[in-house]
Image: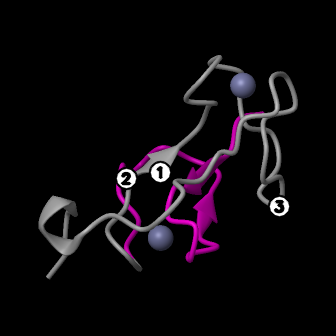
């Protein structure tokens, strides 16, 4: 079962459904698969891709002007 994790490295938010595309805490995108190889993310505590070893999270949070804010 896929899991959706917030791509912000400073945010530990995740969810098990795709009802919303953006994190309500920080405005970053939720991702459900590895950006590099496309393997599905299967655990909310996993930090790296089980298939290729690439980190799931961004190396740094995005600047505010690139984020979707829910006001
Ligand atoms: Zn977040
Ligand atoms: Zn991968």
Tell me the tag on residue 69: none
Question: Which SS does the magenta portion mostly show?
Answer: loop
The answer to whether the residues at label 1 and label 2 have Cβ atoms under 8 Å apart is yes
Name the residue carrying label 2.
20
Q: Earlier in the sequence, mark 3 or mark 1?
A: 1
Name the residue carrying label 1.
30
**Drawn side of residue 24 relative to residue 50, left or right:** left
| Boundaries of the magenta span | 1-24
How crowded pointer 2 is (Cα within 10 Å; few <14, some 14-19, many 20+) is rated as: few
The answer to whether the residues at label 3 and label 1 have Cβ atoms under 8 Å apart is no
* Helix, strand or loop for disc 2: loop
* Helix, strand or loop for disc 3: loop
For the residues marked 1 and 2, what is the alpha-carbon distance in whole angstroms?
8 Å
Tell me the tag on residue 45: 3
In the image, what residue occupies the spot 70% across and 35% down? 2
Quarter of the rendering containing residue 51 = top right
The C terminus is located in which quarter? Answer: bottom left
Question: Between residues 59 and 28, which one lies in front from this camera angle?
Answer: 59
């Amino acid at each position: 079962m896929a899991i959706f994790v917030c791509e912000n490295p400073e945010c530990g938010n995740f969810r098990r459904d795709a009802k919303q595309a953006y994190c309500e805490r920080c405005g970053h995108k939720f991702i459900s698969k590895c950006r590099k190889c496309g393997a599905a993310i299967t655990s909310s505590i996993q930090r790296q891709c089980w298939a290729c070893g690439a980190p799931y999270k961004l190396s740094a949070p995005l600047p505010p002007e690139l984020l979707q804010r829910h006001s």
